[in-house]
Amino acid sequence: MPQFGSFTLLLALALTAYSFVVGALSLWQLTRPSAARISGPERLLETSRRSGISSFFVLTCTALALVWCAFTNNFSVAYILEHSNRALPGPYKFAALWSGQEGSLLLWAWLLAAYGFIVRIRQRVDVRLSAYASVILAGIQLFFVVLINFAANPFAMVQGAIPADGNGLNPLLQYPEMVIHPPMLYLGYVGFSVPFAFALGALMMRYPGEKWIHITRRWTMVTWLFLTCGIFLGAHWAYSVLGWGGYWGWDPVENASLMPWLTGTAFLHSVMMQEKRGMMKTWNVWLIFSTFLLTLLGTLLTRAGLVQSVHAFAQSSIGDWFVGFMIVVFAVCLFTYLRQRDHLRVEHRLESLVSRESSFLFNNLLLLAACFTILWGTLFPIISEYAQGHKVTVGAPYYNRVGLPIGLFL
């Protein structure tokens, strides 16, 4: 089974790479004059879509292979050795899929492929825009599939003698919400890739009107709901298991889940102004760009061990991959915005400081102020270490002192 899992990982890499590269080339050809095109870009675009659909089924096989290894106590797989043992109850054996770094990255890739599968089979809502979104999702998925193939392979084998039993799951993770909280949080994290892909695709193709907002409204609402439930479940877990004496301890990884929730909430509010009045177009584009980047930052903080947290994994070189990917994503967003910013000209402007439109703007400013406050406090230990050579930790008093006035204004 480990060999089967490794094979499906490589197959997923090939399918995802094909979907991204061929899809991007086809879309580029469709922007050129007919006489300068290669033959049949529409047909190639369809093969790209089908390749993306196939990658979902292949990654499903990969995830099932890892779960099978956990249930059959295959301790020749290093990941299973580290995160399971023979006495572990069945639900926690299943939860081993996301209890470690390699498995959680596989879950990220699989959920992204599942979201992409739905986008591709529902392409009739708008074929061209869905094609752009599909290619962008394939690009994001390609990063994660490359990562789990070459930097964090969940099917890496144990060297030397194979132990008779595994190390088991961390006792702090053996709680019923372990089976619910991480997948719920990931459904929110990964789900924001879809409105991001549609927004970036709409900007690239200079999409007329606001139909892309109608298309992504349900995506954004469902994703926001998943993230909200994940945060609440995590808070209850912290209260019940970690003994913090409260539901929220301003832990860095807790903060990382709250930041995209704040910008996502701001996006949900202000996008109504674009839909109804043609306002805040630039604002909305950067809100969804920032939300997606913050989901990547949250994944980076957890996976790279950059901050001290009960949630974080050990120090890992995988952080360099995420930093590089975030730089690429930001560069693509900035380049696309600068090239197409004239397309974001607003139809109406604020007529008064006391109006419905201005209340949406002030609401957004407060949500962003809260997000920046949390971002600064979360990253301050890292910044202080680079500047002074030692970490200066920011605790709950800072967040309470700065966050209380923002909360009262909100």
Image (cartoon, helix red, strand yellow):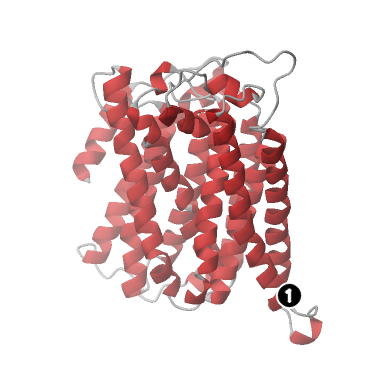
Residue holding disc 1: 29
Residue 192 picture location, percent across and down:
46, 52
Residue 165 image point, x, y percent: 57, 14
* Residue positioned 67% across, 54% down in the render: 16
Give the residue at x 74% y 84%.
Answer: 33
Callout 1 secondary element: helix
Q: Nearer the viewer, residue 348 or 274?
A: 274
Direction from residue 333 to residue 9 in the image, left or right: right
**Rendering coords of residue 51 (x, y %):** 67, 61
Q: Residue at x 39, y 71 (%)?
A: 214
Left or right of residue 89: residue 331? right
Q: Quadrant of residue 76?
A: top right
> Which is nearer the eye, 400 or 236?
236
| 152 to 370, vertically: above or below | above
- Image coordinates for residue 267, horizontal then vertical, percent: 37, 56
Q: Residue type at mark 1: give it.
A: Gln
Q: Residues within 10 Å of mark 1 (few under 14, many from 20)?
A: some
